[in-house]
Amino acid sequence: MSDLTHTDAQPYQASPGLVKALGRVAVFMGGDSAEREVSLKSGQAVLSALQSAGVDAVGMDIRGCLLRTVENPEFDRVFIALHGRGGEDGTLQAILGQAGIPYTGSEVLASSLAMDKLRTKYVFEGCGLPTPAFRAMKSVDEAEAIVAALGTPLSVKPAHEGSSIGIRKVRSASELAEAYEAAAAMDDLVLVEKWIEGPEFTVSLLQDRALPAIGLSTDHDFYDYDAKYLADDTRYRIPCGLAPDDELRLQHLALEAFRVLGCRTWGRVDIMQDAEGEFWLLEVNTVPGMTDHSLVPMAARAAGISFEELVVRILKDTVQEAANA
């Protein structure tokens, strides 16, 4: 019998057996990163969906010392909805793993790698996967040399932030120097990347399967924080607008990127396409947004998977992982 039941009259429900196996689930949200507000929205959405599916779930706003989360826990496993530093970078994963508490998503190393945009690109490059040319920028004095090497326009990113926080598009060495100083104020590691002119796509992954790709377009310079979470005029294309063979190529690339970092269960890969039709990997998200503007739920719906089913599927893997531990 399936662990999920559904009729036309009711939404997906976790089976009694799965509910029992899951026990009490804590949805971790909030945190202290720059993505706190988005995380609270994601966490509340996940919590509501789990409760709607019949799972015994409680929400926990995680602030301060993460070690306190495993002191006398009154829960059996964790759905991680913490975005950014502390929750998505391997720190929380290490603490929960050491305490023997099952949790959703990628393990320590994959989480840490994916959260570090620079080291992610080193992995892509080392594995022969296409990613835009890049440099690690360490001072404003490097601006002229980087522009000479990579050309313009360029993207400047704090290497350890998510949700497009701190990203700037620059067109000159002076703009690069200014953007570097702003990014360096947020992060001790700054990534400068060749800007790919063309359409942007995102591919969501669920249990080693690529969901339908989403094409993104916005009147902003790029799909920034405002376009992701606040604007109502961002355009999402499902189907994504690619020919079937090209979409399959895009999905295979996303799966390969996910696998070379060692990610598991679920996530999202962001990819650009240039004027010649080639795809370029930008980054992998191991705890993507789950708000009403978010892309993973959107892709799941296009595949016929409700939000309730999506979160239960993600959580179900923690039971299997615990059995294999």
Image (cartoon, rainbow, N blue to C red):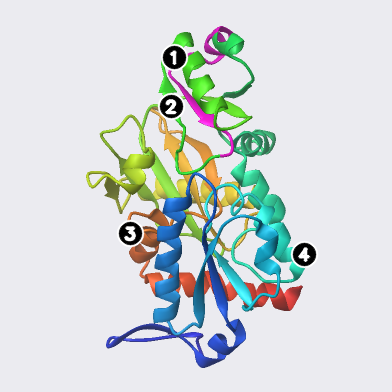
Q: Which quarter of the rendered picture does the C terminus lie within?
A: bottom right
Q: Are marks 4 and 3 in contact (CB under 8 Å)?
A: no
- Precedes in sequence: disc 2 or disc 4: 4
Visible residue check, residue 261: no
**Among the two numbered marks 4 and 1 on one chain, the one whose residue lies closer to the N terminus:** 4
Q: Which residue is mark 2?
A: 168
Q: Is the C-beta separation of discs 2 and 3 under 8 Å?
A: no
Cα distance between the residues tagged 4 and 1:
45 Å
Q: Residue at (59%, 82%) from the top-left corner?
A: 22
Q: Which mark is residue 98?
A: 4
Is residue 154 magenta-colored? yes
Label 1 Cα neighbours within 10 Å, binned few <14 / some 14-19 / many ≥20: some
Q: Is residue 13 above or below residue 305?
A: below
Q: In the rendered image, which residue does mark 1 sit on? A: 175
Task: Characterize the local packing of mark 2: few (<14), some (14-19) or many (20 or more) Cα atoms within 10 angstroms.
Answer: many
* Cα distance between the residues tagged 4 and 3: 33 Å
Residue 30: x and y in percent read: 50, 57
Q: How many marks?
A: 4
What secondary structure is marked by label 3?
Answer: loop
